[in-house]
Amino acid sequence: MKNETIFFQLFEHESSTYTYIIGDNKTKEAAIIDPVIETIERDLKLLKELELKLLYVLDTHVHADHITASGEIRKRTGAKTAISAIAGLDCADLLLEDGQELKLGNKIIKAITTPGHTNSCMSFYFEGRIFTGDTLLIRGSGRTDFQQGSNEKLYQSVHQKLFQLPNETQVYPAHDYGGFTSSTIGLEKKHNPRLGESKSIDDFKKIMSELKLSYPKKIEQALPANLKCGKI
Amino acid sequence: MKNETIFFQLFEHESSTYTYIIGDNKTKEAAIIDPVIETIERDLKLLKELELKLLYVLDTHVHADHITASGEIRKRTGAKTAISAIAGLDCADLLLEDGQELKLGNKIIKAITTPGHTNSCMSFYFEGRIFTGDTLLIRGSGRTDFQQGSNEKLYQSVHQKLFQLPNETQVYPAHDYGGFTSSTIGLEKKHNPRLGESKSIDDFKKIMSELKLSYPKKIEQALPANLKCGKI
């Protein structure tokens, strides 16, 4: 039986970023999530090999650790760039609202606002998979100490939105640093040491306040570029 | 709907090795493929979180680039270690023959001899996925210049065995160095630059003879250890 859904996960080693290609196998319509400028040639080659028609380039948020390939992919494929309306980027073709749906064939990508890591973070649901950006990481979470980060908002996004999805929903984050490639909502509810069901908002605040995180290496280059969809 | 099959892919950054956990969701019986000694704690923790009963530790071959965790996992879980009979390891519990089947619940792992990278390489088929070890890599292949490597055997293993699987079979190799996590038999037939259907055995030999590969960094430690199932 032919798979009806197209799904490929790709990794960029320098920033430990996951990029995803999702699509409908009947119509060959596809989207790419969180592409990185350093790996644009690899990703465009794969899209071509897969004979996909790229409709959307989605960013889960304005990244601070790498430069998005969204603007360049739009230029080279004609796909529409999309990001949360809250990011308010002039350069994006689509400014997505909470609950907004994008079609790939007869399948639907659902945009879900999940602020906390940044104010304009979105997750994308597609065919049993949730792409969580830097909101929910595998056994972790995004940091909340810059770009309007908020512990309250992140906790609420995860508990009131992501954890409402069925337990078997597969979780695909924007990053992983420990060699994990996927999780499930059920596993994160049970085993996420920051955000699991047994953790209160106060537990989460305490954990986040005790993290000793260094300033992101690339933020000075990445943020200004990403506010222009990756224009360097 | 609950997934009937358990599947997790894990990455070890130093040797760029993929480890896989596969299982049957009803009985919770599972196997781990190509575990690495450096990531044993991560993998055992995940097995515990998933509440799996580990029956088998499978190695696709005697690795030259990293030390297997198979012996240590056996010691800590009671799982049986298994490798190709051609490897002839005294330390392994099961010496697998071509076509041999191992059960996880009512699902079957099928061992397929695919020599070429080494003489004792095996691939494992499980529920629409083929774990190809170092035989077939994504848009590449294992090297053939040590451990009884053979261009002829590798080419035949891929063309006469792996490429006979349905095109939609998902390909999961033991390594990737470019950020790919999976492929399909159909994609490799069409786009593998060394082994695709348009390449003859002579094309393959020429390509392999022109690779300028450095001697594997860890071979002096890894091979003797792996001949004892990872005992250092």
Image: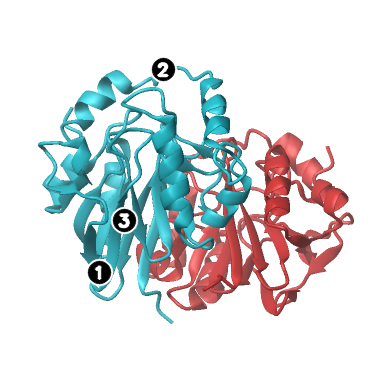
Chain colours: A red, B cyan
Dot 1 or dot 2, earlier in sequence: 1
Q: Specify whether B147 is left or right of A83.
A: left
Q: Nearer the viewer, residue A29 or A202?
A: A29
Element type at mark 2: loop
Circle 1 is placed at which residue position?
Answer: B28
Q: Which is in the foreground here, disc 1 or disc 2?
A: 2
Q: Which is in the foreground here, disc 3 or disc 2?
A: 2
Residue A198 visible? The answer is: no
For badge 1, the amino acid type reads Lys
For badge 2, the amino acid type reads Tyr
Circle 2 is placed at which residue position?
Answer: B215
Residue shown at 51%/28% (left/top)? B205
Crowd rating for badge 1 (residues with CA inside 10 Å; few <14, some 14–19, many 20+): some
Q: Which is in the foreground here, disc 1 or disc 3?
A: 1
Residue B197, compared with residue A173, is above or below; it is above
Residue shown at 59%/62% (left/top)? A7
Find the distance from the CA under tag 3 to the CA under tag 2. Answer: 33 Å
Residue B86 visible? The answer is: yes
Badge 3 and badge 2 in a common chain:
yes
Q: Nearer the viewer, residue B70 or A136?
A: B70
Spot occupied by residue B202 in the image (x, y as percentages of width and height) = 55, 30
Element type at mark 3: helix
